[in-house]
Image (cartoon, rainbow, N blue to C red):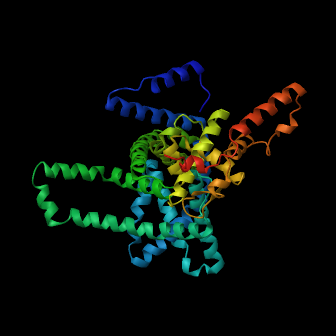
Amino acid sequence: MPKVNFSVKEMIEDHLWPEVAPSSSAKRKGLFALRIAYASIADLMAGQLSLRAMSLVYTTLLSIVPLLALSFSVLKALGVHNDIEPFLFQFLAPLGEQGISIGQNIIGFIDNIKVGVLGSVGLALLVYTVLSLVQKIENAFNMIWHVEVTRSFGERFSSYLSVILIGPVLIVSALGLTATLMNSSVIEFIMTIEPFGSLIISTTKLLPYFMVIGVFAFVYMFVPNTRVNLGAALAGAIVSGVLWETSGMLFATFVVNSTKYTAIYSSFAVVIMLLIWLYISWLILLFGSNLAFYVQNPSSIRVSRQGFEISNRVKERLALLLMQLIAQRHYQGGPAPSLDELTEQASVPHTVARYVLSKLVDKRLLIESNGSPVGYLPAKALDALPLNAILQAIRSAEEARYLSAKAVALSAQTSEVISQLDASAEQALAGKTLRELVVDDKPA
């Protein structure tokens, strides 16, 4: 979270997280929406989303022509490449007349690229440039969703190229279907009947919003290397889609009134405006994904992206709980639970659950499956996993990397007290295994 005046931050959080939950369902939903807005704005002010957006601006400038060249080459083969050009001009519309000039230059560059005569090396470099853009986009979204594992090379190659080559075809098909429906005799007849005619006209005016929201929702669901619920993706897409369309109109007004910048920077003003608009677009897209993350994972709202602090008692209890949940699923013969499932069952933030799970994996008490998403399994038989080993694993988690307990010099009296504590814990858990948390072997 950003560093703000503590009293103000504390006052806001006291109102957002009252000791007594509201009794009204409407108030609870309103409070939930305010919490998500607070957490999303706090992440935006922290600067991490801004840094990712700036990085994507640079990558976009390098990859925009190869990306469009591949997409246009497929559309040219189908004879519908002219139908995708309006999307490029719509994206650049906030730049005004300068946007039209930039769009025409980009199309000129694309026409000069002959994919068929590039050769194997040239085509490979073209594809690599495009794939690197999409990979950086995925990394940005994975950061937002706290995903540390990226897709394999084979998955990236097949998935990315499918979206790049097939996506434009689907968009053009959807536009063609919409135009056909609007020109059909049935729709024309309905438009003569009020209030259906006014309703259809209003819907047509809102069509750009619907298209942007649909594209954003698709990106939010399929780009992160994790399962994203449709509801969360739509919530983020609605907010970011409205923000993007609104900011486009505001930016267009800014461009019209920026004659001073044109006089100072001359022809460089076009480049500067393009960079600013790309940055705003990426920032809005990432902001929407960040909001979708909190909609799907409300338990993570109060956890800072810069780090977290939890007590040793919480770590120990969470380690036992996660081991129990994983062991129960394994004992019942079900599939290995994923991080999302464990987070939901334990009602803890993703960041905290992932931290504890990683320490249990490092100590070889758990193993990760090869599936997608990754699942967790007991590393040994349940009766071969002592409870004391689980507690010791989480208590000594950071010692190998940072500071070992043996490196702390203790006096004889203090060392004796520590030894007694360790002996008491070991004695209390002597002979107890993970099986006892899963199977009730006690006689009825």
How many marks do you count on the picture?
A: 0
Q: Residue 227: x, y in percent?
A: 49, 55
- Toward the left, the furthest residue is 193
Q: Residue at x 41, y 71 (%)?
A: 81
Q: Position of residue 15 (x, y in %)?
A: 46, 23
Tell me: residue 104, above or below residue 291. Answer: below
| Depth order, front residue of 399/18 | 399
Q: Residue furthest toward the front?
A: 443
- Please indicate whether residue 17 sits to the left or right of residue 174 in the image: right
Q: Horizontal and vertical percent for residue 254?
A: 46, 39
Q: Position of residue 82 (x, y in %)?
A: 39, 69
**143 versus 44 height, above or below:** below
The residue located at (26%, 64%) in the rendering is: 179
Residue at point 71%, 52% (across, down): 362
Q: Is residue 138 above or below residue 17?
A: below
Q: Quick check: 145 left or right of 169?
A: right
User: Which quarter of the figure is the N terminus placed in?
Assistant: top right
Q: Is residue 211 visible?
A: yes
Q: Quadrant of residue 181?
A: bottom left
Up/down of 134 relative to 286, above or below: below
Residue 310 shows up from this direction:
no
In front of the other: 174 or 153: 153
**Residue at horizontal 46 percent and vertical 23 percent from the top:** 19
Q: Depth check: 216 or 116 in front? A: 216
